[in-house]
Amino acid sequence: MLPEVASWLRRRTSTAEDWPAHVLLDAKGGAGISVVLPARDEEATVGAIVAAVRTDLMERVPLVDEIVVVDSRSTDRTAAVAAAAGAEVVAQDEVLPGQGRMSGKGEALWKSLAATTGDLIVFVDADLRGFTSSYVTGLLGPLLTDPSVGYVKGCYDRPLVEGERRVEGGGGRVTELVARPLINMHWPLLAGVMQPLGGEYAGRRALLERLPFVTGYGVELGLLLDVYQDAGLDAIAQVDLGRRVHAHQSTEALGAMSGQIMLTAWSRLERHGRMIPLGAPSTALTQFRRSAAGHDARTSDVAVGERPPMIEIPGYAAARSFSSGRG
Ligand SMILES: O=c1ccn([C@@H]2O[C@H](COP(=O)(O)OP(=O)(O)O[C@H]3O[C@H](CO)[C@@H](O)[C@H](O)[C@H]3O)[C@@H](O)[C@H]2O)c(=O)[nH]1
Ligand SMILES: O=C(O)[C@H](O)COP(=O)(O)O
């Protein structure tokens, strides 16, 4: 692992338990805090998440000022369930109607900036199961206590849950198979960000409103890379939120998500002037395993070698005629 990454991990990683709500309330001062849930057809899960935030962080401890569900063209009862649980619900297409209608999660998040008032914005996916309000307090901790932090990503264990079957560490397939290798190759100083695609993160409005938002599933990678480019590695922190269980998409849908992730990476390579000449990508890949002490980081080399076309190899023709003679 690069020494800069090890140093960032040490300095910028904390856990949700480090940030109890009453301590954050003291640190809140006059900062407005908004919690945003983008939601497309999440009637099964959105209500419990809204209710937990309302009860724990608005009624019991008045830390959060508003909770807004951006209804992303749901065809189920998402809007009604969210409103009944105490959220303000806005329809994605009704925010900034003059800007037209684009699609996807990133569009919902972008529109949310215009539908909220907080100085700090916490994003939480609406399909989480087993959500606790410590997700929100965890993400707010570094922002409320350190003015040099502008953006906080959650990290967690991600099981793959299919019916009765549960594979520990099996979730986050696009993260492990696409995003992490890409980040390690082209943005090696971001290799310590354990869940670059995770949907739970928080940022300062003053930073988020200056950044473009990719409209689909590339939004998390785009924001991470743009925050890094704009504000630097030390503006980013991460908080261990424990465990994350969510609704899994089909392999086919994850293929499309992967395409969006790769295109987002490509666009940032181009935009940040790294395409010409495209510097040699790093071949080190840092992965994480939960351990008694927190997380163990393991770095391996994923470099690939290359053989020239066989036709160029002296002796190839002779070897072939030898082989065919054998038959
Ligand atoms: O058009 C859409 C699609 C999704 N969502 C919501 O966005 C959240 C995450 O979407 P989901 O389809 O559950 O994504 P995942 O399969 O969980 O994808 C993971 O990886 C994505 C790519 O980085 C991230 O955007 C997600 O937050 C992250 O959970 C959920 O609340 C959705 O309801 C919308 O609001 N609008
Ligand atoms: O974050 C990811 O990698 C994708 O959302 C896929 O997650 P899953 O493998 O847990 O469905």
Image (cartoon, rainbow, N blue to C red):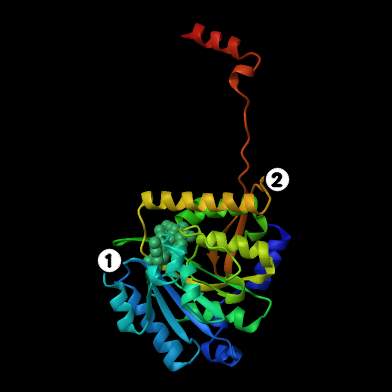
Residue 88, quarter of picture: bottom left
Comparing 132 with 72, the one in front is 72
Residue at mark 1 to residue at mark 2: CA–CA distance: 46 Å
Comparing 226 with 245, the one in front is 226
Seen in the picture, residue 232 relative to 259 is either above or below; the reply is below
Q: Amino acid at mark 1?
A: Thr
Residue 108, quarter of picture: bottom left
Residue 103 image position (x, y, % from top left): 41, 60
**Mark 1 packing: few (<14 Cα in 10 Å), some, or many (20+)?**
few
Q: Amino acid at mark 2?
A: Gly
Q: Nearer the viewer, mark 1 or mark 2?
A: 1
Comparing 105 with 55, the one in front is 105
Comparing 307 with 115, the one in front is 115
Q: Residue furthest right?
A: 3
- Find numbered disc 2 in the image and state the secondary structure of the residue it sits on: loop
Residue that badge 2 annotates: 279
Beta carbon at label 1 within 8 Å of ligand 1 = no
Residue 67 image position (x, y, % from top left): 43, 81
Q: Residue at x 69, y 44 (%)?
A: 276
Q: Is residue 60 left or right of residue 234?
A: left
Ligand 1: which quarter?
bottom left
Q: Is residue 161 left or right of residue 270?
A: left
Disc 1 or 2, which lies upstream in sequence?
Answer: 1
Residue that badge 1 annotates: 75
**Mark 2 packing: few (<14 Cα in 10 Å), some, or many (20+)?**
few
Residue 9 image position (x, y, % from top left): 65, 67
Q: Residue at x 67, y 65 (%)?
A: 230
- Kindly tell me whether residue 170 is visible in this rendering: no
Q: Residue at x 52, y 50 (%)?
A: 262
- Kindly tell me whether residue 222 is visible in this rendering: yes
